[in-house]
Amino acid sequence: MNYSIDSNGYYGEFGGAYIPEILHRCVSQLQEACRTILPSDDFKREFEDLLKHYVGRPSPLYHAKRLSEKYGCKVYLKREDLNHTGAHKINNAVGQMLLARRMGKSRIIAETGAGQHGVAAATVCALAGMECLVFMGKTDIERQHVNVEKMKMLGAEVVPVTSGNATLKDATNEAIRYWCCHPDDTYYLIGSTVGPHPYPQLVAHLQSVIGEEIARQLPEFEGREYPDYLIACVGGGSNAAGTLLRFVDDLRVHIVLAEAGGLGVDSGKTAATLALGRMGILHGARTYVIQNEDGQVTEPYSISAGLDYPGIGPLHAHLAATKRAEVLAINDDEALRAAYELTRLEGIIPALESAHALAVLPHLQARPDDVVVITVSGRGDKDMDTYLKHQTEFNL
Ligand SMILES: *Cc1c(COP(=O)(O)O)cnc(C)c1O
């Protein structure tokens, strides 16, 4: 089975570039830039330099001993929560900013839901002295006050979007619309492995440093580069793609993706795209989409704002369809429990998104010698209000 992208931008039957005519030139320009700029020594040198000295890479691979003892296997945590700005999103934002600058663009636009990608985009624009516009649903602006203030402090303009349910899907539509009107000077910085080709491939490439580091770090503990299990949460799929790309062709590695079950896959309040989605077109790519019988995109729900997206990256849809990856829908209560457990066993407060990956552990049938690597995609500071609201459920 082939898990890499084909020359037309498809992973199996997923992907492609379904875009309005006016963006064809922009997208081909970006494809050309990916071909020529990404492999250049000059780009690689500056990207690696910023990842090391600005983001703080390599992030540690940590052997979680008390968690290992509890689950009867060897659990390692890839600590993306320790990156500058608190999550993996900065890896992608730094890389795309460097690309935009080399393409001669003066303005960066981005979409954001919870505000994490918006903050990462605003951060790299401040760093580069570039203009930054972040499209954000009005509902999300009200829910994510601190991130909105951070973006403004970093010098970005936050553009409220009122169409639809005024959440991430609508913000993405609006960013694409703006791009159509300003194709020449504007670079669209997408935050996950979604959107038209080449974005899913570009974002996966920029995040693949996560898995490359795992392969370099694991031998110190285990004397081998590959784990038996790799676990990551999926919203659009960028931290998972970055974690697994290095290992996707190594069938000794069992890949588990955790998507957001919300209140339950059958509750109507869920973001479990791989469990429920049907083939459709969303934000320029052919992929699974949660939709009703008329093909209307359904508003997703998860306790974790970073996972409630009604689509999924085409790579992940392909990995699920070909059974290369096992997919679990983790419900809100399981994620909360896992977050409290990690906090009390290891002294690490994870992001709610990452807690979905940690909540895979009780479902795993691992043997004592099995090496399990879980990517902790971000830290929990942003989720403290939610954690406090639910603390009584965990007898604290
Ligand atoms: C945004 C976010 C996610 C989900 O995005 P992916 O592209 O699926 O990785 C996961 N974890 C954290 C901490 C996030 O901020």
Image (cartoon, helix red, strand yellow):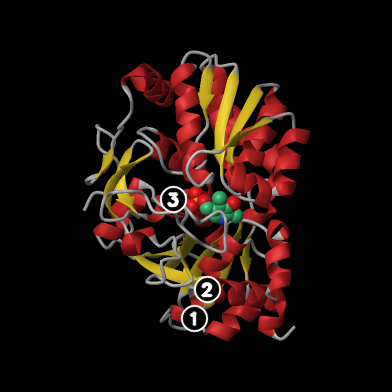
Answer with left or right where residue 295 lies relative to residue 349.
left
What x and y, as percent, mark residue 159? 62, 32
Amino acid under disc 2: Ala
Closer to viewer: mark 3 or mark 2: 2
Residue under numbered circle 2: 359
Q: Which residue is mark 3?
A: 241
Which amino acid type corresponds to the residue marked 3 in the rendered image? Ala
CA–CA distance between discs 3 and 1? 23 Å
Q: Nearer the viewer, residue 284 or 269?
A: 269
Which residue occupies the foreground of this view, 98 or 147? 147
In the picture shown, does residue 136 fall above or below 258? above
How far apart, in angstroms, are the residues tagged by discs 3 and 2?
Answer: 19 Å
Q: Nearer the viewer, residue 312 or 168?
A: 168
Q: Residues under labels 2 and 1: Cα distance?
A: 7 Å
Mark 3 C-beta closer than 8 Å to ligand 1: yes
Q: Quadrant of residue 10?
A: top left
**Left or right: 283, with 162 as reference point:** left
| Residue 120 rendering spot, x and y as whole percentages | 64, 39
**Place of residue 305 in the rendered image (x, y in percent of width and height, measured from the top left):** 57, 55
Mark linked to residue 40: none
User: Given contact means CB atoms under 8 Å apart, are the residues at marks 3 and 2 in contact?
Assistant: no
| Residue 81 horizontal/vertical position (percent) | 65, 56
Task: Answer yes or no: is residue 327 visible.
Answer: yes
Dots 2 and 1: beta carbons under 8 Å? yes
Above/below status of 325 relative to 20:
below
Classify 365 as above or below 265. Answer: below
State the residue at coordinates (60%, 48%). 139
Instruction: Provide the residue designation for mark 1.
Output: 362
> SS at mark 1?
helix
